[in-house]
Image (cartoon, grey):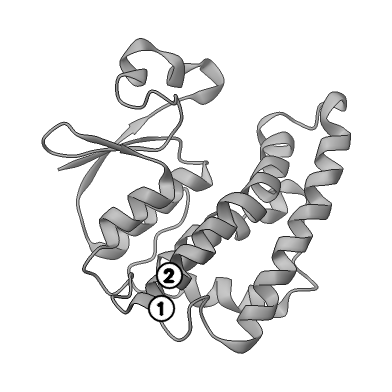
Amino acid sequence: MFKVYGDYRSGNCYKVKLMLHLLGKPYEWVPIDILKGETQSEAFLAKNPNGKIPVLELEDGTCLWESNAILNFLADGSEFLPSEPRLRTQVLQWQFFEQYSHEPYVAVARFIQLYQGMPEARLDEHARCLALGYKALKVMEKQLQRTPYLVGEQYSIADIALYAYTHVADEGGFSLEAFPAVRAWIERVASHPRHVTMLG
């Protein structure tokens, strides 16, 4: 059985949880409190020397880290990762977009607001995150006006990667009112029969 080391409120950890539920794979969840510094313990660093969650531990004790890399591992050979090279590359394209243009702003704004309670020292950073996060949401909106999912007609790990923080963007101060295609996509993703919520 897989072990997942993570925080239920973390979007990056939620990606792994959602993927496992969609695939119907059993797992054990090992809670990690980042605010208490648990990712910096010697035991945790032995699993991920980068000291971040999530970590997926395989049955043989091998550990995989970086949420999108874990998604690719878990989805390999399933309906959630296309085998056709162009489509598979488009999945990677959106995953890179998520890590470089979306998560650093949408997730960080949420961390500042939800986890830290908007400390005055980070207000300017939060405002910058909102501006750049909205830019990323506009890119998603344009694609989702054309196709039901980020890579055409098929629900894939590209959607999982971006759903994780987009569906809780309001917890970072974002409004999705101006993004009807994104809102419809969120509902579409959540309607999958094996969907599980972040805290569910």
Q: Is residue 200 visible?
A: no
Q: Nearer the viewer, residue 122 or 194?
A: 122
Q: Which residue, given by chain and number where applicable, does mark 2 sit on?
A: 89
Secondary structure found at label 1: helix
The amino acid on which the numbered mark 2 sits, given as a three-letter code, is Thr
Residue at 47 percent across and 24 percent down: it is: 33
Q: Seen in the image, is 196 located left or right of residue 178?
A: left
Q: Is residue 169 visible?
A: yes
Determine whether label 2 and label 1 are within 8 Å by CB.
yes
Residue 168 percent location from the top left of the image = 62, 54
Secondary structure found at label 2: helix
Q: Seen in the image, is 14 located left or right of residue 78?
A: right
Badge 2 crowding class, 10 Å Cα cut-off, few under 14, some 14 to 19, many 20 or more, is some
Residue at 32 percent across and 79 percent down: it is: 84
Q: Quadrant of residue 125?
A: top right
Q: Residue pushed farthest top?
A: 42
Residue 160 percent location from the top left of the image = 46, 62
Q: Seen in the image, is 129 located left or right of residue 185?
A: right
Residue 169 percent location from the top left of the image = 67, 55
Q: Residue pushed farthest front?
A: 85
Residue at 61 percent across and 88 percent down: it is: 146
Q: Seen in the image, is 31 located left or right of residue 58?
A: right
Establish if 41 lies above or below 31. Answer: above
Numbered label tally: 2
Q: Quadrant of residue 113?
A: top right
Residue 93 percent location from the top left of the image = 51, 65
Q: Nearer the viewer, residue 105 or 120?
A: 105
Q: Nearer the viewer, residue 54 or 99?
A: 99
The amino acid on which the numbered mark 1 sits, given as a three-letter code, is Arg
Distance from the alpha carbon under mark 2 to that under mark 1 = 5 Å
Establish if 148 lies above or below 173. Answer: below
Q: Which residue, given by chain and number where applicable, does mark 1 sit on?
A: 86
